[in-house]
Amino acid sequence: MKLRTVPASTGLQWVRLGVKTFLRQPLAMSGLFFMFMAVVSVLALVPFLGTALATLLTPAVNLGLMSASREAEAGRFPMPKQLVTAFRGGPAKTRGMLTLGGLYGLGLLVILLLVGLLEGNPEGAATMTAEEAMRSMVTSPALWFGLVAMMPLQMLFWHAPALLFWHGVPPVKSLFFSLMACWANKGALLVFLLGWTGLFVAFSVSLSLLSALLGGAEAAGLIVYPAVLFMASMFFTSIWFTFRDSFDDSEPAGAAATDDFAPH
């Protein structure tokens, strides 16, 4: 495994590849993302335990969506079993993935606790109007601290599940290599995120105009919800390419162990 450094312009290529690959298998990719969201929604119904379990499984689900993107890129139809790819590599990799999930949950908990301490209990919060509450939230130092603190956390876990599963890197080392890869390619990742931000903004404006033309909220809802699902699915499809191009293209360790990861 060797780290690659790519030019900043590669970020736009990742966006294009994500959209292109999604359009190869739109029903499969959006269906898998919908299944993921459905599971999260069901878990959210269970107080505390459901949220903890969803957080624990986050790295595994991210790997599953990357695996589905890899299948679609190769011209194969991603099956639902791709979502549980993380648990099909043997006990050692399953333990490693759950370790990543636990570390991710711990990191998220620390950030939330710090944000809570900084936020405290704003004076007059109970009597604020919705507009005042929104203004207070946007200008809150705690909110901006949380957003900034989430960046290194996401960098640590961006490539870690794929490194652990496809390259056999231990959990803690996978976090280190993920952070180094993200930092080395920070320009490309910034362009990647800005590209998706631009697409989401254009998408939102287009939906607003379309909703205004259609008039009724019910008619607009029939278009908005599937469109949001497709856009989110495209974004997650593109994440695979950020990993693929950040490391060498030699066949991942153990890739031939199942039909899903046979050489392309």
Image (spheres, rainbow, N blue to C red):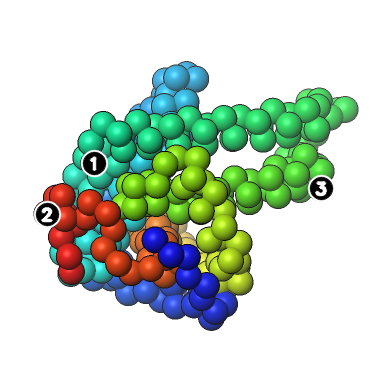
Q: Position of residue 138 (x, y in %)?
A: 76, 48
Residue at screen point 15% across, 50% down: 257
Q: Earlier in the sequence, mark 2 or mark 1?
A: 1
Quadrant of the rendering where the N terminus is positioned: bottom left
Label drawn at residue 259:
2
Whether residue 167 is visible to the viewer of this picture, yes or no, is: yes
Quadrant of the rendering where the C terminus is positioned: bottom left
Residue 83, quarter of picture: top left
Residue at screen point 29% across, 41% down: 86
Tag in front: 3 or 2: 2
Q: Secondary structure at mark 1?
A: loop
Task: State the CA–CA distance, disc 1 to disc 3.
Answer: 46 Å
Q: Earlier in the sequence, mark 3 or mark 2?
A: 3
Dot 1 corresponds to which residue?
89
Instruction: Pick whichever, 133 or 6, lies toward us.
Output: 6
Dot 3 corresponds to which residue?
139
Q: Residue 94, relative to residue 4: is it above or below?
A: above
Q: Secondary structure at mark 2?
A: helix
Three-letter code, disc 2: Asp
Q: Is residue 71 left or right of residue 57?
A: left
- The answer to whether the residues at label 2 and label 1 have Cβ atoms under 8 Å apart is no
Residue at screen point 52% across, 33% down: 103
